[in-house]
Image: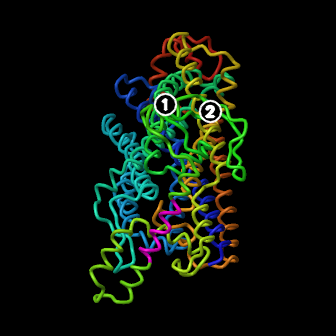
Amino acid sequence: MEFGVVELSRLQFAMTAMYHFLFVPLTLGLSIIVAIMETVYVMTGRPIWRQMTKFWATLFGINFVLGVATGITMEFQFGMNWSYYSHYVGDIFGAPLAIEGLMAFFMEATFVGLMFFGWDKLSRVAHLIVTWLVAIGSNFSALWILIANGWMQNPVGAEFNPDTMRMEMTNFFEVVFNEVAQAKFVHTVSAGYVTASVFVLGVSAWYLLKGRHIELARRSIAIASAFGLASALSVVILGDESGYSASHTQRMKLAAIEGMWETHEAPASFTLVGIPDKEARETHYAVHIPYVMGLIGTRSLTQEIPGIEDLVAEADDRIRSGIIAYDALMTIREQRDATSADVRATFEDHSEDLGFAMLLKRYVEDPRDATEEQIAMAAEDTIPGVGPLFWAFRIMVGLGFSFIAVMVYFFYRASFKGMQFPRWALRAAVIIIPAPWIAAELGWFVAEFGRQPWTVDGVLPTALSASHLSITDLLITLAGFVIFYTVLFIVEMGLMIKYIKKGPYMDVEETDTWMERHSHRLRTHDGKGPFAAEPAE
């Protein structure tokens, strides 16, 4: 297979995934914020909270629909662009995707209509339950997707069957409770909560700058800053947990993120900034913070974190072990039921390294024929792009800490300064609206680009996973997806801006309450304006 096909397939999937994730984090976070606002409405009965709920739910609905539309395309791509991947690991990867469709998607589809159209048909408590079910369904959807993705990062609960030539699930609960999947879920969901909080904060700040919908904007800032502060702190804490998990499940990724070429004495320091140089095997002008990486990666001051050079040497050993497994596998395929117990035992002893032998398929048809030079090149291929990972991670982390500072400031002003906000702070809140999306996309870049050269870490190389498509097919579909998704993005932005400019509206309940509250003023009006009183008899 031409490597250009693999690269174009990767580019196409990366494009659709990154477009899709423009909608996902806002859906995750806004669903919870809307549910919180409606909870306050049910508890207090104050119409302003009903108005807030319905306004932010409108924006949630626009985003939700387009998120679903872009997400469906991704699932079809597994069969179209990654057919060998689907064949090889479909028994494991397909299970959480199927559960996501049955448990989460149908829950959202069932209750989202009731949420929007059931205000006057359900009691307050019943409608609140519906809203929370929509929020829970959205988060369940993320859970099962991230279980599937987490398995690709740390393939537990499965083993290769030499008779069927496929990976098969051996323990469903190991797949579900995979430590990487659970860490990714809570980290990703918290990032979505931060995204929605910054969005609500920024839109509300814009209203205050324009002098519109003051009460809605101030209360929305209070909710967004409190919820966003808790979420931003969670992102940092749970990101630390992901780093700890990577130290024993994806050590090469961790070393690349750190630009750590050599194994240093424990405890490892954290590289704040630097310029990674793959050719020189060095990170130039590095500024280190002592002990920090050791504490993050190992939770100790005595355990080493291996560097890239040692991990490449380890990969070399595993490739050689994988060649033994590949040779035994070919014997099993040729002899079938007549295969001796010794051959099967040899395969079992080395089967965990079979994927490393498959790295040689990029250079030679039969891994058993690989030269020393080809083995060395395959081992070198296990190093992901150090420079892009190094900087993507640091920009993401810098943005994460900046969100904490923003939320602390607005929470303080909302809680202790009578919800009075300086205009410079409001302008800053509007400007930073795109920042959480940048951080989220960088996070996915680190997770997925850092896993290369694997589709399933240590099991299936990316170069073997793609379908046998032509360059022309891929270029045409890539262009089609880019045009279609760009149109959808423009449509969403247009609708969002339209409804934000339009602002909230008063429904029947709110109008009745407003009339009751201002009835004295209406009765004593001086006769000017649309609410002029009838002439006295």
Q: Quadrant of residue 127?
A: top left
- Residue 145's place in the image compared with 328, above or below, is above
Residue 210 in sight in this render = no
Left or right: 403, with 54 as reference point: right
Q: Nearer the viewer, residue 163 or 126?
A: 163
Q: Is residue 77 within the magenta segment?
A: no
- Residue 272's place in the image compared with 349, above or below, is above
Look at mark 1 in the image and give the residue it sits on.
51
How dense is the environment of label 2, judged by Cα within 10 Å: few (below 14), some, or many (20 and up)? few
Determine which of the numbered discs, if any, sits on residue 316 in the image: none
Q: Nearer the viewer, residue 469 or 420?
A: 469
Q: What is the spatial separation of the Cα atoms under label 2 and label 1, in whole angstroms?
A: 35 Å
Residue depicted at x 52% and y 25%: 225
Which amino acid type corresponds to the residue marked 2 in the rendered image?
A: Gly
Residue 510 in sight in this render = yes
Residue depicted at x 61% and y 71%: 374
Asked whether disc 2 touches disc 1, contact meaning CB atoms under 8 Å apart, the reply is no
Q: Where is residue 143 shown, x and y percent of the image?
A: 40, 49
Q: Is residue 320 within the magenta segment?
A: yes
Q: Main secondary structure of the magenta part?
A: helix
Which amino acid type corresponds to the residue marked 1 in the rendered image?
A: Gln
Look at mark 2 in the image and give the residue it sits on.
398
For the magenta stretch, what is the residue range?
315-326
Q: Nearer the viewer, residue 531 or 24?
A: 24
Which quadrant is home to the N terminus? Answer: bottom right
Q: Regarding mark 2 in the picture, which secondary structure is present there?
A: helix
